[in-house]
Image (cartoon, rainbow, N blue to C red):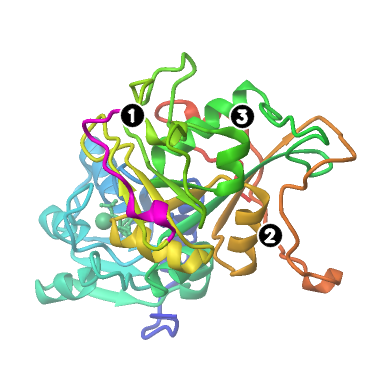
Amino acid sequence: RPGAEPSHDFSAAEHEAMRAALEAARRGIRGANPVVGAVILSAAGEILHVGHHRGAGTPHAEADALRLAREAGTPLEDTTMVVSLEPCNHTGRTGPCSRAILDAGVPRVIYAVADGTDTARGGGAFLAAHGVDVRQGLLAREAHDLNDRWFIAQHDARPFVTLKLAQTIDGRVAAADGTSQWITGAPARDQGHALRTRVDAILVGGGTLRADDPTLTARDAGGEPLARQPLRAVMSTRPVPADAKVRRGVVDRAPREDTEREAPGDTGTDHGEVVCADRGHDGRFIHLTTHDPAEALQHLRERGVSHVLVEGGPTVSAAFLAADLVDELWLYQAPLILGDGAASVASLGIGTLAAASSWRGDPVRHPADLARPGHEEATDQM
Ligand code: AOF
Ligand code: ZN
């Protein structure tokens, strides 16, 4: 737990500002990125601006707060930037926050907890080296807890894992006769596609592949492919049928012979890859010939995947849960009861209530929130 011990004393106003930053952070969408809040505090202890990170691909919390200050014309030369995570030091989907804070002329920075990731680390040291007064450790425990699973995934050097379960009230994913499509309705389906376009990879097991023959593409309500397509991964030691829909291009209906090559994975000995890309590397298909979730995640990480969406079925869901490799759970519950049929999660070998896999729920919001452009609030996260 980096930065857990406060190394300085902090004023009441600084505490209050950090609490406001943590509160703002909670409004962001969890996932491959942590949720982060940033407050600009005046020398008199007044909260001037509150920014937050809304989710991967959007401005960071500090940049959000600095934008508000710019728009309001707030002078920054005697302010403190109070942020729940160490400002990043890298140019990723946005520019480095460390540089933005320095360039804006903010003389003091307080952050709750260090960002130890290989890419982003070093923002605090950068700012200190450029004469900014940098302190850390304020409400570090709260800030760590806010992103606990993100910190664990970073520490374990593996992708962040979201598990999606779509089930009936009694936890079934298929009826006794095997019928399973559209257990949940159109809003959940649209949100599921919005979720797919935010992740780097979707993963299903061989059972789901054979039962549903899914395309694993991200589409809008009209069925058109969304601009950003995840890598499509099948985790199975058995061959992926040559005519499986995951092998096809995202747009094309027919297999694209010109871009496909035989997957070594189909021999059951290696992790094979078939390229079915319509846009750059988007929509590629990969066959992971393993039953071990940790091994599958390592292979995905080597391909640059930082956020995986596991979409079933019950065996794969159970494997990830049993390995404690699920960071976030999205639960879609249809108002249906079957009383029979496959459960959404296969046996975890848990024999007693005290051993249950236990989840903390965020408030449930309307599924349309995720699909709406410019959304401020998340979500159905558990
Ligand atoms: C910050 N402020 O609000 C967040 C940070 O993909 P990118 O470019 O958005 O970078 C994501 C990484 O940046 C993420 O893994 C984490 O290390 C850091 N997140 N940093 O200064 C923020 N969300
Ligand atoms: Zn940043």
Does ligand 1 reach within 8 Å of label 3's beta carbon?
A: no
Residue at the image point whose x is 56% and y is 55% from the top: 328
Q: Quadrant of ligand 1?
A: bottom left
In the rendered structure, which disc, 2 or 3, sits on the residue that comes first in sequence? 3
Disc 1 element: loop
Disc 1 residue type?
Gly
Highlighted range, magenta: 256-268
| Residue under label 2 | 359
Disc 3 residue type?
Ala
Q: Main secondary structure of the magenta part?
A: loop
69 left or right, relative to 290: left
Foreground: disc 2 or disc 3: 3
Image mark for residue 317: none
| Residue under label 1 | 249
Image quarter of the N terminus: bottom left
Q: Residues within 10 Å of mark 1 (few under 14, many from 20)?
A: many
Residue at the image point whose x is 27% and y is 63% from the top: 87
Magenta residue check for 267? yes
Disc 2 residue type?
Trp
